[in-house]
């Protein structure tokens, strides 16, 4: 499974999306069956999974974004990549479309926050090009810093934080996706955030 497959599946030559009213049980069964075969090493099944998932996602993203095609395609790529990288956390006893929908909710919310920030910044400035370059660079640096910080946490703290705080999943959804109890998810988030705060304070002290 490669991100190249993801890029290909999200291409413009993918067949037209299924109607948003397509039966969820049918989509669930087909996507899950293809994914399980893919996880067993069937590369053709993974490519078919990506094509079907692309249809499924494009219809839903168009409904959420009122058919702004450029935004839809950008978000579609982001969701496909997030699914690709998050497959190690997927459990077959969890509804696949519910897991994917949680990722979509997070990505759409993040998109709206980013658009709001862009609109707020998009005022006439003498040197606005430089401002946006710096903003993009700082955002990339922040993402790398966050990844490094999360990597310092044990799995029982890192996964609850990633699922609830980054992907926007509920405690119940996170418990189902990770196999943890809901109380363990809550404890993991609490302890993980406390540990991250201590790490950040420690780094701040180093520079004083």
Image: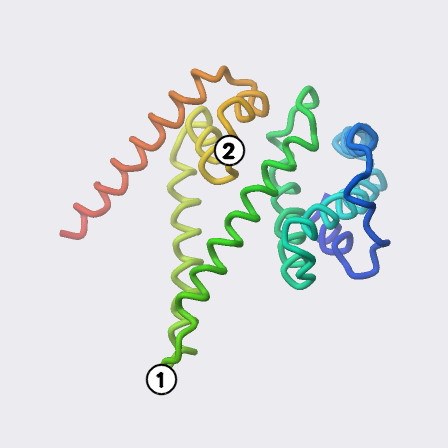
Q: Residue at x 81, y 47 (%)?
A: 51
- Does 10 sit above or below residue 153? below
**Residue sitting nearer the eye, 199 or 10:** 10
Q: Secondary structure at mark 1?
A: loop
Q: Position of residue 21 (x, y in %)?
A: 79, 39
Q: Nearer the viewer, mark 2 or mark 1?
A: 1
Mark 2, other Cα within 10 Å: few <14 / some 14–19 / many ≥20: many
Give the number of marks. 2
Closer-to-camera residue (106/152): 106
Label located before the other in sequence (2 or 1): 1
Q: Which mark is residue 53?
A: none
Q: Residues within 10 Å of mark 1 (few under 14, many from 20)?
A: few
What is the x, y in percent for residue 14? 83, 55
146 over 126 or under it: above or below:
above
Residue name at image x 61 percent, y 51 percent: 78
| Up-down relation of residue 128 to residue 112 (above or below) | below
Helix, strand or loop at label 2? It is helix
Please provide percent x and percent y for residue 195.
30, 32
Q: Quadrant of the N terminus?
A: top right
Q: Say whether residue 139 is left or right of residue 104.
A: left
Of the pair 42 and 47, the residue shown nearer to us = 47
State whether residue 158 is above or below residue 79.
above
In the displayed structure image, the side of residue 149 where residue 197 appears, left or right: left
Disc 1 designates what residue? 126
In the image, 197: left or right of 145?
Answer: left
- The outermost residue toward the left is 208
Between the C-alphas of marks 2 and 1, the distance is 41 Å
Q: Tell which of 38 and 77 is nearer to you.
A: 77
Residue 31 coordinates in the image, percent (x, y): 79, 34
Q: Which residue is mark 2?
A: 163
């Amino acid at each position: 499974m490669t991100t190249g497959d993801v890029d290909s599946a999200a291409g413009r030559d993918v067949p037209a999306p299924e109607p948003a009213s397509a039966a969820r049980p049918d989509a669930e069964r087909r996507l899950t069956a293809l994914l399980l075969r893919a996880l067993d090493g069937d590369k053709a099944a993974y490519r078919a999974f990506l094509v079907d998932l692309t249809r499924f996602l494009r219809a839903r993203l168009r409904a959420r974004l009122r058919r702004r095609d450029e935004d839809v395609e950008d978000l579609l790529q982001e969701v496909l990549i997030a699914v690709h990288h998050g497959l190690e956390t997927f459990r077959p006893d969890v509804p696949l479309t519910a897991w994917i929908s949680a990722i979509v909710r997070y990505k759409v919310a993040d998109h709206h926050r980013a658009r709001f920030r862009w609109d707020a910044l998009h005022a006439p400035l003498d040197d606005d090009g430089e401002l946006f370059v710096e903003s993009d660079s700082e955002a990339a640096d922040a993402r790398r810093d966050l990844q490094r910080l999360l990597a310092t946490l044990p799995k029982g703290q890192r996964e609850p934080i990633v699922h609830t705080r980054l992907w926007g999943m509920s405690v119940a959804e996170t418990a189902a996706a990770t196999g943890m109890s809901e109380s363990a998810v809550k404890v993991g988030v609490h302890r993980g955030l406390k540990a991250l705060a201590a790490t950040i304070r420690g780094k701040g002290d180093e520079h004083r």
